Image: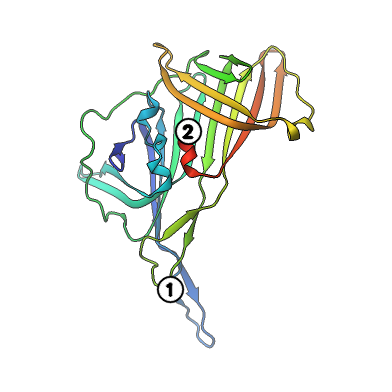
Amino acid sequence: NFVYLNEDVLYDVQSVNASLSAPRANINVAGMTASASVPDGFLQGSLSIERSAVTLSGNDPFTKPEFYANGFSGIWEYLNATGAENYFAITSGYLSSYTFNASVGNVPTISNEIIAFGNKIGQTGVSSFDGQTGDVYFTGAYAFPKQMTLTFPDGATDAVQSFDLSFNINRQIKPRLGQMKAIPETFISYPIEVNLGINLLVDEYSAPAVESLLCRPTQDISLELLEGCAGTPIRNFNFTSGRLISVSSQEAVKDLNTATLNYVKLINDVNDIGTIL
């Protein structure tokens, strides 16, 4: 199984879910028992992809601005039951969601969903991808304790137990009469909300007054994920102007104390997403 976006290969793909649909609507006519079924809406498809985190941020195509402002091509190549090569292709696809999750004791994961519109979806439009050469296999790195570093303006800690960063990009279709099969023009519904959740080990934690969250200044936060054995960086995230929206803490007799911090950041230019990843 191989997944390519433009001419970039997605490494360490664990699962792919491909779908396509041609929406229809029923039209009822007075005095008739049967109804007519007619096309209703644009042809559309999607690719949902889950993969293990790769070694370097540069190996993730979604760190590149070209994957946000403009549509891109993609293809999933796989072998069927007889060993013959099969594929599912899209043209003018758009990233609709991105989630990065890392926790101690697990291989970090990246989940993406890509949507596409028009008549070039499925086994049409693209027959092969020749942009990638060489070895495309890689083994995801394991997240060890003290390998996730969180940096605030006033300090840093390696007591991170888990974090997840996610965002959705909602696109609206600009319909035109007679273009149901064509690739439609789309536009992004702003703002884009980026969410960051962090779970930490703490000696003790004093929750702030809830009213203080309303006027608390934004914070610039950076997260670095290191490979467990060599200690080389796997990913770096720069979450600037993040606003703390909720906190929680947990204490138990047999467990270590933890605190969970949830931040949100609003983006009004899709090209700014690449500065986070």
Q: Quadrant of residue 76?
A: top left
The residue under the point 47% across, 22% down is 106
Q: Position of residue 146 (x, y in %)?
A: 52, 13
The residue under the point 39% across, 72% down is 178
**Residue behind mark 2:** 275
Q: Is residue 6 left or right of residue 20?
A: left
Few, some or many C-alpha atoms within 10 Å of disc 1 (few <14, some 14-19, many ≥20)? few
Q: Is residue 260 left or right of residue 239?
A: right
Residue 50, relative to residue 39: is it above or below?
A: above
Q: Position of residue 63 (x, y in %)?
A: 41, 34
Q: Please state which amino acid type lies under the numbered disc 2.
A: Thr
The residue under the point 40% across, 63% down is 22
- Position of the N terminus by quadrant: top left
Q: Position of residue 95 (x, y in %)?
A: 43, 45
Residue 108, relative to residue 9: is it above or below?
A: above
Q: Quadrant of residue 36?
A: bottom left
Q: Is residue 13 left or right of residue 212?
A: left
- Tell me how the rendering is colored: rainbow
Residue 8, relative to residue 58: is it above or below?
A: below
Residues 247 and 85: in front is: 247
Q: SS of the residue at dot 1? A: strand
Q: SS of the residue at dot 2? A: helix
Q: Quadrant of residue 221?
A: top right
Residues 173 and 64: in front is: 64
Say the numbered circle drawn on residue 38: 1
Q: State the separation of the CA atoms marked 2 and 1.
A: 44 Å
